[in-house]
Image (cartoon, helix red, strand yellow):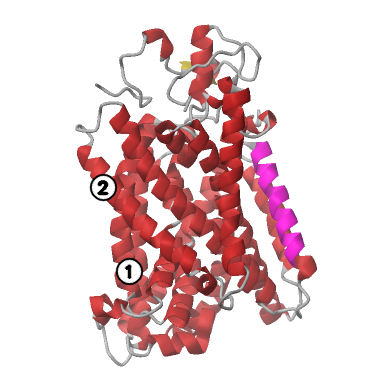
Amino acid sequence: MPIGSSGKTSSAPATARPGPTTGPGGGISTFKGTERALRADRIGTPGLLLSVLAASAPLMVVAGVMATTYQVMGIVGQPLLFVILGVVMALFSVGYAEMSRHVHNAGAFYAYIARGLGGTVGSGASFVALASYSTLQCGIYGMFGFEVSALLERHLSVSVAWWIPGLLAVAVTGVLGALKIDLNAKVLGVLLCIEVAMIVVFDTAFAAQPGPQGLSLHAFDPTTLGGAGLGTTLCFAVTAFVGFEQAPVYAEETSRPGTVVARVMFLCVGIVAVFFALSSWLIGVATGPDHVVATAGKYGPKLIFALSEPRLGTVFTDVLHLFFVTGIFASMLSFHNVVARYAFAMGREGLLPAPLGRTAKASGAPALGSLLQTVIALIVVTGFAVTDDQPVGDPTAPVIQLFTWAGNVGAIGVIALMATASVAVIVFFVRRGAGRAQAGRLVCAGLAALALLVVLGYGVTDFDVLVDAEQGSVLSWLLPSLIGIAAAVGLVHGRVLRARRPEVHARIGLGNEAFQLDKAAGAPAPGDAAAPTPHKENRR
């Protein structure tokens, strides 16, 4: 059976599948009004690509994640892992991108999962997505505050507690998050371009002045992947890719979501895989593959700066520190935008209070969703600040705890969502009789699901290593259980909606389309007592 643009079979009555109508001025006209829809045509391919890549925080990954992975895990073959994971993410993107052509919803992950596995599972996924991206975003405030504090101490001899710049960043991010997405894209784009330029400069310097073993390709030898730290290194490497999967979140705000979103995802995966594999290899080249682990152990997170200074000078290293901080800020803003849109999508569909599902009249942005994430971040940062009894300049609370704990909890959640979404893609097309036509894409989705489940298994079993906790520590099960709790809350919420408010349950994953269906049927607004079930596929 042929598949329509909304991802459902064409056998349904024509009146049940109206396309979006155009209102005055070219805006989307919905049953609930334009405030229930994100503004279309706000962002094109370049802007979306920059916004998504900014979440990957290239400089933070190269200077932070890569150096830490070499230091803690001792896996010389880190560059090869980026190549392998690039293949896995490309396999995942094949099915995910095809799904994005049929479902345009700011809820992305949970919308896809709901359309494939039902509204109840979609409800569980929505809470996991909200919790995962929110913790990722909150964790970055710790790293940002610590780095700004260190810069002020180094250059101005001003001693400031990390939480002061951290809380200021919460406020600034909250304001920017409530503005137009095209303005956000410009801010992110400028910061990202500077980050990439800095990385290219020191990568070139490392290649021009290699260590004692020259331009060795030893890091791409499969034998370098041996060792007890392989599983944990996989998880660290996966976190470097987190960001590309956010492209469908902006589908409603793009000019041509059916092509732009898929194009951006594949571009992002390719750029990240090649860029990070090359950078991690050149770090090893600069020290020599045989010495990279020991050198990383000596310098820790300062490895990149220690390797850059003798080659490029003190001035460049100081500038690199500055843009390391702006890169962290870009990542914060990107994740903030994603969380705001998930909250918007959930509010629009009745999974969260309805006011969250409205946009600001002036900017068309999900202002209340942005405010919700700002409040959450404010509470989290304040909580860590109040319990921090270490002296100023100590990284324990902001980096070792807030950044590391939150980052890895969020990464575990995103990996789980990716694996579940891959399964949902298969079910979505098979149930619609398109399994044979989409066979190649479904095979890719199946392989991606298996690979991601393996990584997830490593992440959960080795979580004590990921958060640098002692073996048997309560953190090793308490922190990852936060994702399980979010899933349980979402599943229970979905079951309650199915039993008590079936009309709301039926809309999970439909997004703005649900209101178009209501309009065509002359139905009351969602949430009204007389509202009928608009769709059968989400009644599970």
Residue 226 seen from this side:
yes
On screen, residue 491 versus residue 109, left or right, reads right
Q: Position of residue 282 (x, y in %)?
A: 34, 77
On screen, residue 287 versus residue 40, left or right, reads left
| Label 2 – label 1 distance at C-alpha | 19 Å
Residues 432 and 79: in front is: 432
Q: Is residue 444 magenta?
A: no
Q: Residue at x 60, y 62 (%)?
A: 479
Residue 106 seen from this side:
no
Residue identifier under label 1: 81
Q: Residue at x 36, y 84 (%)?
A: 286
Q: Mark 1: which secondary structure?
A: helix
Q: Position of residue 206 (x, y in %)?
A: 36, 81
Badge 2 amino acid: Cys
Determine which quarter of the picture holds residue 166. Answer: bottom right
Determine which quarter of the picture holds residue 293. Answer: bottom left
Q: Is residue 373 magenta?
A: yes
Badge 1 amino acid: Leu
- Earlier residue among tags 2 and 1: 1
Q: Residue at x 30, y 46 (%)?
A: 445
Q: Residues within 10 Å of mark 2 (few under 14, many from 20)?
A: many
**Residue 340, placed above or below residue 293:** above
On screen, residue 169 versus residue 240, left or right, reads right
Per the rendered image, the range of residues in magenta is 367-384
